[in-house]
Image: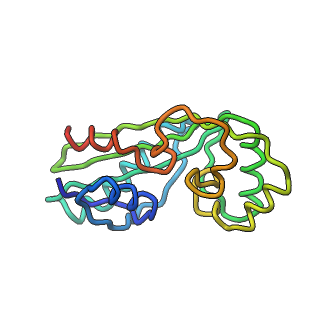
Amino acid sequence: MKFILASTSPRRIDILKKWGFDFVAEPSSYKEEKFFCDAKRTAMANAYNKAFSVYKKHTDRTVVGADTVVAIDSKILGKPEDNDKLREMLKLLSGRTHRVITAIAVIKKEKIAVDFAETEVQFRKLTNSEIEAYIATNEGIDKAGGYAIQGIASSFIERTDGPLDNVIGMPVALLRKLLKK
């Protein structure tokens, strides 16, 4: 089934191409927000709003939106705006377990399906020099939680529990399930 991905995220596009999905990417005009203090609800609301912003222009098509959030304690970590915020996030994640939630929303002719996948990620204890070296790569600035598990930050990970493609930003099994609905 051909669909419109309401995103231009290179990571999402790569995963979908790798798995042979038939889609076109179109940027969403929706700006992500932190709703509630609940990471799952925030991700689901953002995924839906991203999809709906594109669906309004293509009501005859299937549109898919996705949103990934990183949560630790009661905090939702978005994309760091600068190196100071990135440093703060990495220090918070260092030596601890956090949750990564990716929500997917599918809209087709007024039918809506929204769900999420969740993965626990355990960071090893990071040194200040490792944090500074990572910041210098600029890899984490445009990523939820300030890191990319498939990139340099993979060396920070001690274990994961849940789908790895969820942490990258597109849980394929969940997408297939929602497209079938």
Task: Name above or below for residue 118 compared with residue 175.
Answer: above
Question: Which residue is at a point 73% across and 60% down the rendered structure image?
Answer: 134
14 displayed left or right of 125: left
The way the protein has been coloured in the rendering is rainbow
Quadrant containing the C terminus in the rendered view: top left
Residue visible at 35% across and 53% down in the picture: 65
Identify the image quadrant of residue 79.
Answer: bottom right
x and y percentages locating residue 56 in the rendered image:
25, 61
Quarter of the image where one finds residue 171:
top left
Q: Position of residue 98 (x, y in %)?
A: 63, 36
Instruction: Pick the residue in front: 50 or 153.
Output: 153
In the picture shown, does residue 85 fall above or below 70? below
Residue at figure coordinates x 77%, y 52% from the top left: 88
Looking at the image, residue 59 sits to the left or right of residue 13; the answer is left
How many labels sit on residues? 0
From this view, report whether residue 100 is shown above or below residue 19. Answer: above
Which residue is drawn at the image coordinates 46% and 50% (left, top)?
169
Q: Position of residue 96 (x, y in %)?
A: 72, 35
Residue 4 location (% of width, % of height): 26, 60
Q: Is residue 66 left or right of residue 139?
A: left
